Image (cartoon, rainbow, N blue to C red):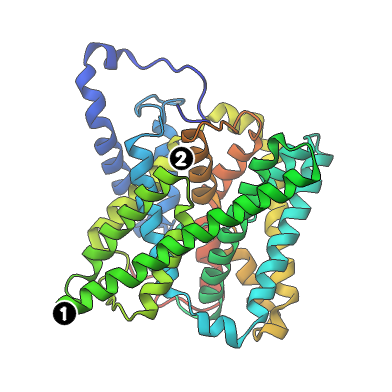
Amino acid sequence: MSPLAPAATELPDLFAVMPGIQGVMWPLVLLVAWAAGEFAFRFARVPRISIYAVVGLACASSQAGLLPPSDGGSMLFLADVAFGLILFETGYRLNLGWLKANPWIGVTSVVEATLTFSVVSILLHLGGLEWATSLLIASLTMATSPATVLRVMSERRSSGQVSERTLHFAALDCVLAVFVFLVLVGLEGATTPEDVGIETYRAGIVLVASAAMGALLGIIVPSLLWALRRTKQDASLAVAVTVILLVSFCHGFGLSAVLATLTFGMVARGRRVLLSRTDRGFGVLGDLLSLLLFVFIASTMSWTHVRDGLGLGVLIVVSRLAAKSVSIGAFARVSGISWRKGLLTGLAMSPMSAFVILMLEQSLASGIDLMDRLAPLAAAALLSELVGPILVGQAMVLAEETTDPQRV
């Protein structure tokens, strides 16, 4: 059962009378979410993924009861694959040469992630939470979800300094957040300073092994494609299958699928695997899995937890957004952009729900149930899921980086 759902949920009588109908509910809800998202985007310019979240939340087992509770099984795996494909595309779009030529981007990323972690943890502790809980929540709020950023960028056809910096910061933040989160989870039972060093070392090993796995497949798969002279025709299919393999491997061996798929994308780009504009996003497969991802994320949330943690949830969202905007804005000039674009980049860093929920679901599947202690994160994740895509879209429009934003 999802960590964000109540311990027990009564299914509607319809499931008792017609047990077979439960198997068709996911496809039906996905169809409803797709239709609602298309209508909202075409007529109100509301990001599709925000509507997907509304439908997923409304149909969740803890609300309308139309969807079964998440059990860490096939739906979580499909959501992880969807996230992995987006992370691959994120890694594929990263320009390491740009980071090397402009080291201030890396410095800015470390500063904004550190400031976010510090501000959120201190405010949550002052709000009444224990230090251990505050630090765990703060570690997850360091991250920005590349899934939301990339989907909105694709939807708005945006490109430019704000768009590219947001994507690079999101990727770097995810790596930092995974490392800090793994260290803090490992320190749950720590009693001596030596334990801190051991858990930090273990977290480092996980990240190194994950990156090595992604890099290895980033070398093998392109080499195979070049040997078969099929780099253009079959690149998307080969990449999609490899991402599924990476996610499966990481689940089985306790590695980070986030870092593995990001690294795979970066190395594949360096090995000159070519993805055309029609290949990016993985076409219909990518659209379908993205739809499933955002509906699934919202379906894991319980309105009860959201309501109970709303106060601290709002505090998390506001303080996190302020920390990122201020720190990125402060380094804007030295890193080569205007203050205004720096602040808009911070605004575009608002989404975090996809990363947060999948990390918690994966922890639950590994036997670590954190959500009873991290309840305020439910409200923050929901607010981020609903409002985040809208803020990203507005940041791109205000930065004048969208191509005909009124065009469908």
Rendered location of residue 376, percent (x, y): 66, 36
Q: Tag 1: residue type?
A: Arg
Q: Residue 161 location in percent, x, y?
A: 55, 80
Q: Residue at x 31, y 51 (%)?
A: 289
Choose the circle earlier in sequence order: 2 or 1: 1
Question: Mark 2 and 1 residues: CB-CB less than 8 Å, in contact?
Answer: no
Question: What kind of element bears circle 1?
Answer: loop
Rendered image quadrant of residue 90: bottom left
Residue at numbered disc 2: 298
Q: Position of residue 50 (x, y in %)?
A: 45, 50
Q: Residues within 10 Å of mark 2 (few under 14, many from 20)?
A: many
Task: Identify the residue at image location x=63%, y=77%.
Answer: 105
At x 74%, y 38%, the residue is: 132
- Choose top left, top right, bottom left or bottom right for residue 267: bottom left
Q: Give the x, y percent position of residue 229.
A: 16, 79
* 392 vs 7, nearest the viewer: 7
As drawn, is 350 to the left or to the right of 296? right
Q: Which residue is mark 1?
A: 229
Give the foreground label among 2 and 1.
1
Confirm whether residue 152 shows in the render.
Answer: no
Q: Amino acid at mark 2?
A: Ala
Q: Residue at x 62, y 71 (%)?
A: 344
Q: Secondary structure at mark 2?
A: helix
Residue toward you, 64 or 178: 178
Write down the quadrant of residue 128 in the picture.
Answer: top right
